[in-house]
Image (cartoon, rainbow, N blue to C red):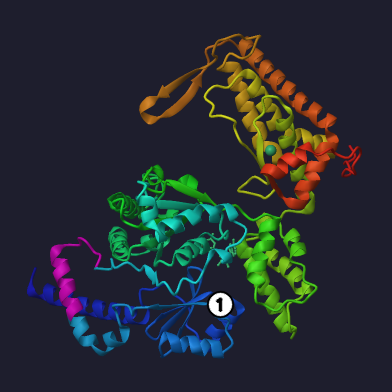
Amino acid sequence: MGPNFLRRSLIYLVVLVALAAIFFAFFPFSPAVETGSLDRLVGMAKNGEIDRIVQQGEALTGMYGDTPVLKATFIGSTAELHHYLVGEGVDMDKLALEPQAPSGFNWGILINFLPLVLFGLLLLFLFRRARGAGDQALSFGRSKARLFSIAKSTVTFDDVAGVEEAKQELQEVVEFLKFPEKFTSLGARIPRGVLLVGPPGTGKTLLGRAVAGEAGVPFFSISGSEFVEMFVGVGASRVRDLFEQAKRNAPCIIFVDEIDAVGRHRGAGVGGGHDEREQTLNQILVEMDGFDSSTNVIVLSATNRPDILDPALLRPGRFDRQVILDPPDIKGRKAILEVHTKGKPLEDSVDLETIAKQTVGFSGADLANLVNEAAILAARRSKQATGMQELEESIDRVMAGPEKKSKIISPREKEITAYHEAGHALVARKLPHGDPVHKVTIVARGMALGWTRFLPTEDRYLWTRSQLKDKLASMLAGHAAEDLIFGEMTTGSHSDIEQATKITRKMVTEYGMSEKLGPRTFGRREELVFLGREVAEQKDYSESTAQQIDEEVHALIQHCYGVAKEILTQNRAKLVQIAQELTAKETIEGQELDTLFNQPAEESPPTPKRKKK
Ligand code: ADP
Ligand code: MG
Ligand code: ZN
């Protein structure tokens, strides 16, 4: 290596560093967000396109949920900004202002001291080069957690509608935060982690803020995807920082949004982000285990993919409580509409119940969006108040939105689903060994258009043959009801049938429940115990036995299907009654369901038209 080589590489380096510095001065580390005028920001706030503004020195960032939408500048304090926005006619109930300490890096200063900084960077660069391309992360570990001070989290449970069960469960968390002595004096362990589970837009983030608001405690929030976004090795240190800050501010809430981004099954990751996630996840676990029972910090987190979470997260002492947020039914949708129209001018003719009926499959976020669209329409028509017409038009607009398309449920589908679920419920109710029906709903969840929840009378480790047969009958009853009422079948029974077939096969080949084939098993499974996995089944029976097995499975399913069909035929009026009630209310549960079952049904109620065969 001659001196020439050294000089050349030095020049290259200087040019490189200068370019990098200029690049970063113009494009800071924050994700690329459009910069616009203050006027535009105000306009967006009025239209509800942003719901909070983060003020950091002179920089404002308009955010919707967790996504930055528009940047602008404002010179003045938060109070002045508030005053200005009110003056511009922004509804401050709908807009949160979040002052943030200016970030450590001030780019204006950087430009002034550019030469000095360049020189420093150069030294650093050479130094690092000398040490090899080892740990590349500078100290970007400071947590970006936002501190919502007590006055700032103004969201309360009243702002969250239609998720009563979830609110009840979280009420307990609020109590813990407010009066920890009440629980610790009795030796009760304060819950450490609560996992909010629900599809997108059901109000998980909102509910997290509401808990902080109700308890009047600080609220640290960070989103799982933020952990992964930056340099390697930073996730873990951010977690450490976050928990440190939180412990200093106890009692408080740490809210980890979208935890599935870091909390995936370890080892299941694909590509480079994988190690980083693992370290971040490990750090979360370490921190949560490190709390002693007196630390009054509760970790709330939210996900719409509980199925992919690492089981370690769900162990006792971590996120051992789950709060489920279901998509809203009619009553819930009406309540959400009420929350979002509160304080806004509405015409007298507006009937929110009618809107609720027409918005099957809408999430809370969709409904908030709908109310907003309607207000925009009304404003464009220079009206003084939002009318029914605008609301109804907005339904179509929201539905036409890109993310909604898959979820539109037609009235016909709704009706079929109602009969399908009513069939499950009615047959289970009528059979002696059926589990009590706890809840029937036609509010779509995941892939299922509706579902019926059974409440087992006892924990069951043994199933009798009669119980299994009754279970099969109620499983197949959805299909039977569709056939009976509409003379037609749909793909909606797919998973019912699949499950029923599985159970029947097991009854015949594993439980010895077939009289013809007797008590023996068919098929040998090699189990690779250390992998916890089953490998392909080996056939240990003849072809003719195989045929017999098929026949037995077939006969058993047919028998149970027949039982279901029979019950439904005999109680057709009841079936119609339940289905109609379901169509109207979407969800029926508990006492209401009992009453409905016990009510006498009309003799010949109007039934839907059968499809001609
Ligand atoms: P998630 O975190 O579950 O995806 P968010 O909490 O971000 O959903 O909801 C987005 C917006 O939708 C909220 O800010 C609120 O305006 C509205 N929203 C969602 N669910 C509800 C609800 N249950 N009640 C009232 N508003 C809701
Ligand atoms: Mg969210
Ligand atoms: Zn079904």
The answer to whether residue 454 is above or below residue 268 is above
| Closer to the camera in the image, 416 or 530 | 416
Q: Is residue 114 magenta?
A: no
Q: Horizontal and vertical percent for residue 86? A: 54, 87
Residue depicted at x 71% and y 18% = 555
Taking the image in four quarters, ligand 3 sits in the one at top right
Residue matched to label 1: 93
Image quarter (top left, top right, bottom left or bottom right) of the C terminus:
top right
Q: Which residues are magenta?
A: 120-138
Residue lying at 37% horizontally and 84% vertically, measured from the top left = 57
Q: Nearer the viewer, residue 537 or 519?
A: 519
Q: Residues within 10 Å of mark 1 (few under 14, many from 20)?
A: few
Rendering coords of residue 479 (x, y %) = 74, 35
Q: Residue at x 50, y 21 (%)?
A: 537
Q: Secondary structure at mark 1?
A: loop
Question: Left or right of 47: which side holds 262?
Answer: left
